[in-house]
Structures are given as structure tokens and as C-alpha cells.
């Protein structure tokens, strides 16, 4: 706590000098007030306050973004005119709704196919809609079917009857492996996940015991890579379950896959820390939701610090779009 107070005091003084706005005393009052209110939940929920602060410091200082998802602005896009129609001479799919496009794209990734072409209505189709469907609706929900899909390119061309011809080209694991090998990696990962469920006898455990077993299994059997550059596999459940080395995305995706196989209601959650993008999970026990971060639980000091805690607790170390996920219980799981 002393370390945190000292840091905030220094930041307040620096900010007052740089901005020239308000007095240093005002800024100090604000920061001390924020510190007191912000850490009240920590003190109530975690008596070993210094352990919390030390672990949080360690996580934030050693953590680099574990997400491998480009922004919508970084997706390569090409718009053709009517003189460049050769690419679209073999289009057979027609998607009249976002739901139809979503189903077609999911099937393409499930089959580990490189390219898909379709006609879409310009009344709903935009590059932002395509991005949302691929990453937010599909990649964040289908751990095996979309495994390794971190990039795509899109080519479009306007046609008659308010239609747009669309070609999407997917890249799996940065084209590191032939498509048949990617399919094999998916099969290996699913087989290993089913093996883990059997070995842990999750079907015969309570929901709490299943969640605890998944958290502990990943901690015991997976490590965070020592340094960048992180492999593409480490962002996937293949990295966590087969190679036993993964960044947060791999931990969280593997956890989500195991939860799905043992019937634990859950979400794969993405957000941001001061060090970059981060991923973890939400789980439901006895009708209430709780936060779980297996990556940050993988420490030598406290394997349960981020286990079945609240939104309030998690908000001290990260931000996320809360509208996408259910709110947690107001107190940690007892």
C-alpha cells in the first residue's frame, strides 16, 4: 500500500507541473480520494493487501498484450470496379441477411477453407459488419472451429440489384502450416480437451469443482512464454493444451473449450490492461456469474487471486465492454 501511495503522489505532482491546471494539493486530494475508494473493495475482499499489490505489480510489469486480433482499420481491403469481374465469376453463395453470412463464414472456418465468396445486400453489408461477425461473433465464441484465425483480407465489388460481391480470404496461424495440418491441429486439440475432461472426471463434479479443476489444470500444465515474439500457437487452445505454452488468449480459449465440454455456462472475455489487450473468462455457478483469470492465477504466490471474483475486483486491473457480458455477483464466491 505504501508503494502505491508513493507512486500516486509522484504522479500527481508530475501531472500538476505538466498540465499547469489546478494546484498540486487539489490533485493530491483527488488521487488520495480515488485510492481510498478504489481499494476499499480490495481490502474487504482480500485481507492480504500487500500480496494483492505485489502480485498486481508483477503481472502488469511482466505482461505484454496476449491478444492477436487486428483492429478493423488494419484489415486489408480492396474494392474492384465492374471491369475487374474475373474474381467473382464463380460466386454461388448469396447471403440475404447477416445471419446467413455468419453461418457461411463459420462453416468456411470450420472446414478450414482458405477462401469464400458470396453476394450480400448493400443494405446491411459493410466492412465493419464483416469484422464484427468474424471476430466478435465467431472467433470469440467457437474455440475449435475458428482456431488460428487471426487474419483475413476482403475484396468487394458492387453489382446490380443492390448487391455486393464479397471475397474473404482467411489466414490460419499466419500461413505457417498447410491447411490439412491446421485441420489436424484442431482435431488434436479437441481430442486432448475431451481427454482432460475424462481424466479430471468433470462430469461427476459439482459446477464449482469443475471450474476449480479447470483453473488448476491450466496452472499446472501450461506456462506463459518467457519473451516475445509469441508464437501464433500460443494464442490458441492448441498452445495451452498440446504445447503447454500459451499467452492469456490461449489460457482463456482453452478454459472456454473445457467449460463447454463439461457444461459450465461461461464466456470468453476480452479487455485491456495498462500493458495491452487481455483475455479471461466468466463462469456461472448457482445462477450467479463470477470472473476467472487462469493466466493471472498462474503464480507462485496465489493461485486463486483472480478465481471467482467480482467485476469490482477485476476493474482495478483492467477494463472491458461490460455491455457484452452479464454482470457478476457483488461478492466473491464463498
Image (cartoon, rainbow, N blue to C red):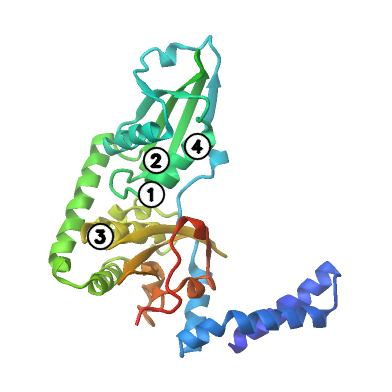
Please rate how many residues cluster around mark 3, counting C-alpha atoms within 10 Å: few if below 14, some from 14 to 19, many from 20: many
| x 67%, y 85%: residue | 6
Q: Quadrant of residue 248?
A: bottom left
Q: Residues within 10 Å of mark 1 (few under 14, many from 20)?
A: many
In the rendered image, which residue does mark 3 sit on? 258
Q: Where does label 1 land, which residue?
A: 232
Residue bearing mark 4 = 129
Q: Earlier in the sequence, mark 2 or mark 1?
A: 2
- Of the 4 image quadrants, the one containing the N terminus is bottom right
State if disc 4 and disc 3 touch (CB < 8 Å): no
- Residue 4 lies left or right of residue 28; in this view the side is left
Neighbour tally class for label 4: few under 14, some 14-19, many 20 plus, Cα within 10 Å: few
Distance CA(mark 1)–CA(mark 4): 25 Å
| Callout 4 secondary element | helix
**Is residue 266 placed above or below 45 in the rendered structure?**
above
At x 31%, y 50%, the residue is 143
The first of marks 3 and 4 along the sequence is 4
Q: Secondary structure at mark 1?
A: loop
Q: Quadrant of the C terminus?
A: bottom left
* Pointer 2 or 3: first along the chain: 2
Estimate the spatial distance between the alpha carbons at disc 3 and disc 1, rounded to whole Å.
Answer: 20 Å
Closest to the observer: 334 or 24? Answer: 334
3 and 1 marks in contact (CB < 8 Å): no
- Which marked residue is nearer to the observer: mark 2 or mark 3? 3
In this rendering, which labeled residue sits more in front, label 4 or label 2?
Answer: 4
User: x and y percent of residue 108 in the render?
Assistant: 31, 33
Position of 298 relative to 182 (above/below): below
Badge 2 is on which residue?
A: 174
Residue 261's disc number: none
Mark 1 vs 4, N-terminal side: 4
Amino acid at each position: 500500500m505504501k508503494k502505491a501511495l508513493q507512486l500516486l503522489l509522484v504522479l500527481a505532482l508530475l501531472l500538476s507541473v505538466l498540465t499547469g491546471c489546478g494546484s498540486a494539493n487539489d490533485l493530491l486530494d483527488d488521487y488520495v480520494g480515488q485510492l481510498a475508494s478504489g481499494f476499499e473493495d480490495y481490502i474487504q475482499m482480500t485481507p492480504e493487501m500487500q500480496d494483492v499489490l505485489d502480485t498486481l505489480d508483477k503481472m502488469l510489469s511482466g505482461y505484454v498484450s496476449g491478444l492477436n486480433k487486428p483492429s478493423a482499420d488494419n484489415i486489408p481491403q480492396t474494392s474492384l470496379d465492374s471491369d475487374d469481374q474475373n474474381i467473382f465469376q464463380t460466386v454461388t453463395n448469396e447471403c440475404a441477411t447477416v445471419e446467413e453470412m455468419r453461418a457461411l463464414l463459420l462453416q468456411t472456418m470450420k472446414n478450414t477453407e482458405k477462401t469464400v465468396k458470396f453476394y450480400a445486400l448493400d443494405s446491411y453489408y459493410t466492412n465493419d459488419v464483416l469484422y464484427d461477425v468474424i471476430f466478435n461473433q465467431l472467433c470469440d465464441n467457437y474455440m475449435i472451429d475458428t482456431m488460428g484465425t487471426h487474419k483475413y483480407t476482403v475484396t468487394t465489388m458492387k453489382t446490380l440489384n443492390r448487391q455486393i460481391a464479397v471475397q474473404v480470404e482467411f489466414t490460419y496461424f499466419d500461413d505457417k502450416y498447410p491447411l490439412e495440418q491446421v485441420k489436424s491441429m484442431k482435431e488434436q486439440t479437441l481430442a486432448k480437451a475431451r481427454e482432460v475432461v475424462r481424466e479430471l472426471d468433470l462430469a461427476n463434479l459439482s459446477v464449482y469443482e469443475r471450474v476449480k479443476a479447470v483453473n488448476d489444470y491450466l496452472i499446472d500444465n501450461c506456462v506463459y512464454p518467457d519473451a516475445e515474439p509469441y508464437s501464433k500457437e500460443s494464442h490458441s487452445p492448441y498452445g495451452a493444451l498440446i504445447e503447454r505454452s500459451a499467452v492469456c488468449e490461449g489460457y482463456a480459449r482453452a478454459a472456454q473449450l473445457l467449460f463447454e465440454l463439461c457444461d459450465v455456462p461461461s464466456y470468453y472475455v476480452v479487455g485491456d490492461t495498462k500493458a495491452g489487450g487481455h483475455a479471461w473468462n466468466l463462469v456461472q455457478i448457482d445462477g450467479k456469474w463470477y470472473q476467472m483469470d487462469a493466466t493471472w492465477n498462474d503464480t507462485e504466490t496465489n493461485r486463486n487471486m483472480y478465481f471467482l471474483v467480482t467485476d469490482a475486483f477485476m476493474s482495478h486491473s483492467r477494463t472491458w465492454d461490460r455491455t457484452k457480458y452479464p454482470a457478476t455477483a457483488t461478492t466473491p464466491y464463498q
